Amino acid sequence: MGGGSAAGFLNNLDRILATMPADTRVIAGHGAVTDMAGLRRAPDFMRDLQVQVERAVKKGLARVEAARTVTLDTCPDIKPSFRTLANDVLAIYDESRSRQ
């Protein structure tokens, strides 16, 4: 909604993870304070979410159906903190459809 993309978010995370010292404390704009180990889980969350949304698109699910059915069982400890998972699904759905 702010003009970014899931792919851009992943690129930024990869760059941050490659340059920050291991003892860095991470203070996110939204969410709990964590460390680099916690931040390393974020790309897993986003990649899993992208895969599941792209599967929904390939199955021909509508946006709302995708938002209702995509879950993140592989990352139960990570939850979107300032938006809902459904909002993230919708944004990635739109991004995926725009590439087709």
Image (cartoon, rainbow, N blue to C red):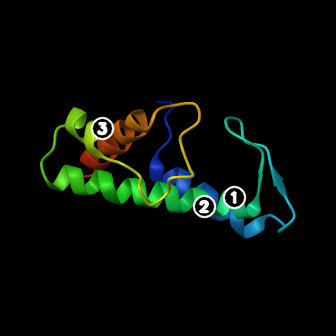
Identify which residue is drawn at 27% across, 37% down.
68
Q: Badge 2 is on which residue?
A: 41
> Is the Cβ of the residue at disc 2 closer than 8 Å to that at disc 1?
yes
Q: Where residue 44 sits in the image (x, y, percent)?
A: 52, 62
**Quick one: SS at disc 1?**
helix
Q: Badge 3 is on which residue?
A: 67
Front residue of 58 and 67: 67
Q: In the displayed structure, would residue 95 be above or below residue 82?
A: below
Q: Amino acid at mark 2?
A: Arg
Q: In the displayed structure, would residue 12 be above or below residue 17?
A: above
Q: Amino acid at mark 1?
A: Gly
Q: Which mark, residue 38?
A: 1
Q: Where residue 61 sits in the image (x, y, percent)?
A: 15, 44
Q: Amino acid at mark 3?
A: Ala
**Quick one: SS at disc 3?**
helix
Which one is earlier in the sequence, the residue at label 3 or at label 2? Answer: 2
